[in-house]
Amino acid sequence: MKKWRNRLTSIWLIAALVMIPSGVQSQHPAKGSNRADEAVMKIRTDLVSVSVIVSGREGRLIPGLKRDDFEVYENKVRQQIEYFSDEDQPATIGIIFDVSGSMKGRIAQARTALQYFAEAGHPEDEYFLVSFNHRISDPMEMVDSQALLRRVNMLAPHGDTALYDAIHEALGRLRQSRHRKRALLIISDGADNHSRSGMSELRRQLREAGIAIYAIGANEPTSSSCTRLCHFEAQARLESLATMTGGNAFFPHSTESLENAMSQIATELRRQYSLGYVSSQPVQDGAWREIKVRVNSDFVKEKISVRARAGYFATP
């Protein structure tokens, strides 16, 4: 296996940032300040919430956009935006940390990556930890970043990998968070080989949750048991999940690119736009509804990328 430059061993990391907007509520369209929008959120129960990332060249985030710069479409029908915010708000972030046997020799880099992320996060973020191998730990209590890093330093790798089951456990824990903005960061070295649930079930859970996944994956196979075909399939799954949920996938090749990717993930969580609309199709028929977000503004002079979740299930 090839080595990274700057004395970093092979890229081993798969990290996913899962942003979960809580159910936002409103009663009447509000087009004024963010304070008015917050009042809107407290009354309605049928507002569809969408987190949006707008980036330009080389992934540079585009700040300063307003409500009228955005267009939201549901099943190709334009919707009226009733809630808008671009505030930097703290988040509750669940860390899903792989301690399977294949992490031996890579655990130090995993801790370093987590430190990069915490340093770039909001100072009022709160965290909980779910560690996993073939077994899933009970989620820890909510702590600050320093307490989280101390707990991670106590972990020792062994056993197989039950990644999908760990994601399911963390999604349940997030329902107890105190912040409206919620996220999951998954740090793992490869594909799942021990979960009871499968990828199709996980996709359904993520679509129902309305979350965005950010992934940092291996450039090369991380174990002798994973062929290049196995490795490329794992990368394709990560890219598919990221695209489906409005996130992004990274495959860094050096220490510097790993640090940049982790910092970018944290920054995107802090600088996302939050939109909300009431569907023009009020019937809750359980069907999948596609969401498309566009930016139409003279403020943006360059080619941009707009990322948001692909849709939602219209359930009561």
Image (cartoon, grey):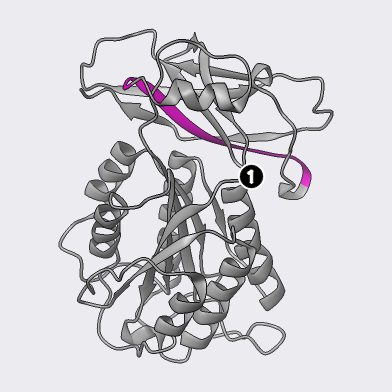
In the image, residue 222 lies in the stretch drawn in magenta:
no
How packed mark 1 is, by other alpha carbons closer than 10 Å (few <14, some 14-19, many 20 or more), is some
The residue most toward the right is 301
Bounds of the magenta span?
A: 45-57
Q: Is residue 286 left or right of residue 186?
A: left
Whether residue 195 is situated above or below residue 67 in the rendered picture = below
Q: Is residue 285 left or right of residue 53?
A: left
Element carrying mark 1: loop
* Front residue of this view, candidates 131 and 213: 131
Residue 198 percent across, percent down from the top left? 22, 55
In the image, residue 53 lies in the stretch drawn in magenta:
yes
* Front residue of this view, candidates 288 and 69: 69
Residue 204 percent across, percent down from the top left? 26, 41
Majority SS type along the magenta span: strand
Which residue shows up at 67% across the image and 16% down it?
68
Residue 73 percent across, percent down from the top left? 50, 16
Quadrant of the frame with the N terminus: bottom right
Kind of residue indicated by mark 1:
Arg
Residue 109 percent across, percent down from the top left? 54, 83
Q: Name the residue under label 1.
A: 271
Which residue shows up at 25% across the image and 70% down it?
162
Q: In this view, does 40 lie to the left or right of 285?
A: right
* Front residue of this view, candidates 176 and 314: 176
| Quadrant of the rendered image containing residue 209 | top left
Which residue shows up at 32% across the image and 87% down it?
101
Quadrant of the frame with the C terminus: top left
Whether residue 160 is situated above or below residue 192 in the rendered picture = below
Which residue shows up at 47% across the image and 75% down it?
221
Number of callouts: 1
